Image (spheres, helix red, strand yellow):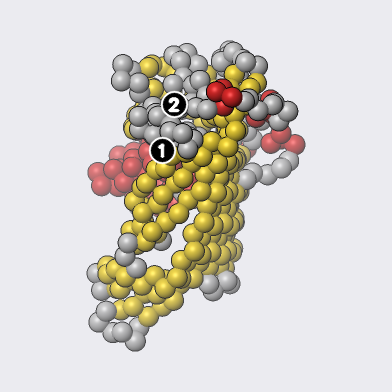
Amino acid sequence: MVASKTTSTLTSFFLLSLLLPLLFVIGCKDQKDKEGPVDDKKGEQTSQNTILPGDTSSAKEVSGEAKILTTLKFTPKKGDIFRYKLTQISKVVQEGGVTANSNSIQYFTQKVTDVKKDGRIELSIRYDSIIVNNLTVSPKMRNEVTFDSRKKEDKVNPDYKQYNAIIGAEVTVLVKPNGEIEDIMGHKAVLEKALGNNKDSLTAQQREMFENQLKNEIYLVPLQQEFQFYNDNGMIDSSQSWFRENMIPIAGIFPAKSTLMYKIENVREVNGKRIATISSNISTDIAKKKLSQNSVEFVLKNSIITGVGKSMVDVEKGTTIYKSNTISMDLDVEAVNKENKEQKQRMKQSINSQITIELIK
């Protein structure tokens, strides 16, 4: 029974945590939110002369050769410390009267602990505080989950043990010069803390599943949102633009090629530093619109996917000052029983997501 209860609790935790990085949340606009992360550690000083988003509002654009960039890479220096606020919002509407609204704010701190000879950057990252408000409503059910790591009652609530295990825990993140996260390390210790006395109640398969979910959904996916993608060689041609292609599963089933296009819109100077504003948009090419899994055939009847973004980066270091992305998806999928074609189900879903990342100090 202990194993069953632990598995159920952790599964609920990780399923809810998917809404943090993947459903792009905006948090509550109350006074406490404006105060920032109360779990912040004292004694740590962020990098000197840090440029914040507000510093760029009245900055003038540079002209001539200064506005033409030939390289952009993620190249912070050892000892640099940055603090970010990750704000997300998402609304999912599914046919049949099902809606899911997800709201969250995550404050996190990162410190550059090493710069490898090949240019890869090693970071120590921790979540200082997390605020979550998830609401799912259907004709037969209403489920709301709220959590605020800054509140004493939530810190001591055993129902939130898994969330609280994340707060203050440091993991190591390895980032390539092109802005892609290569690896996450140290997350297993976080899982051990989350499991507590129940850590021996999971099977090896269950433990591996939760380790992977923790690594990807709690750390890799949301933290990757911070880093601007650059060309692998860091070079920028005269068009001042570049692109990145990835294979992604639409609706978790249909393979699609996602193309992200980036373009430098302008370069401004703030306190002697150049700040580049980069626009982005996404396009998708779905390779297969009919696939089978076991006895079910899935057919993608219609799909509309759009995405735009804007980011501001420090030209010298390639670090993110501000980033905002908005994605909209409308999907229409039909599931057909291959053994009985009369048994079919139509599933329509609309997803609207937004994520904003701000350097706060």
Image quarter of the C terminus? top right
Q: State how many labels appear.
A: 2
> Residue under circle 2?
71
- Inspect the image, locate mark 1, and give the three-letter code of the amino acid beneath it: Leu
Rendered location of residue 110, percent (x, y): 49, 24
Q: Note whether 284 is above or below 95 in the view shown.
A: above
Mark 2 or 1: in front is 2
Q: Residue at x 29, y 43 (%)?
A: 208
Disc 1, SS: helix
- Can you see residue 47? yes
> Spatial distance from mark 2 to mark 1, Cα to Cα?
26 Å
- In the figure, is residue 345 to the left or right of 155? left
Q: Who is closer to the viewer here, 4 or 87?
A: 87
Asked which quadrant contains residue 312, the reply is top right
Rendered location of residue 272, percent (x, y): 62, 15
Mark 2 packing: few (<14 Cα in 10 Å), some, or many (20+)? some
Q: Residue at x 37, y 80 (%)?
A: 344
Q: Residue furthest bottom?
A: 342
Q: Residue at x 37, y 38 (%)?
A: 215
Q: Who is closer to the viewer here, 360 or 155?
A: 360
Rendered location of residue 156, percent (x, y): 56, 35
Rendered location of residue 358, percent (x, y): 60, 33
Q: Which mark is residue 220?
A: 1
Q: Residue at x 47, y 51 (%)?
A: 282
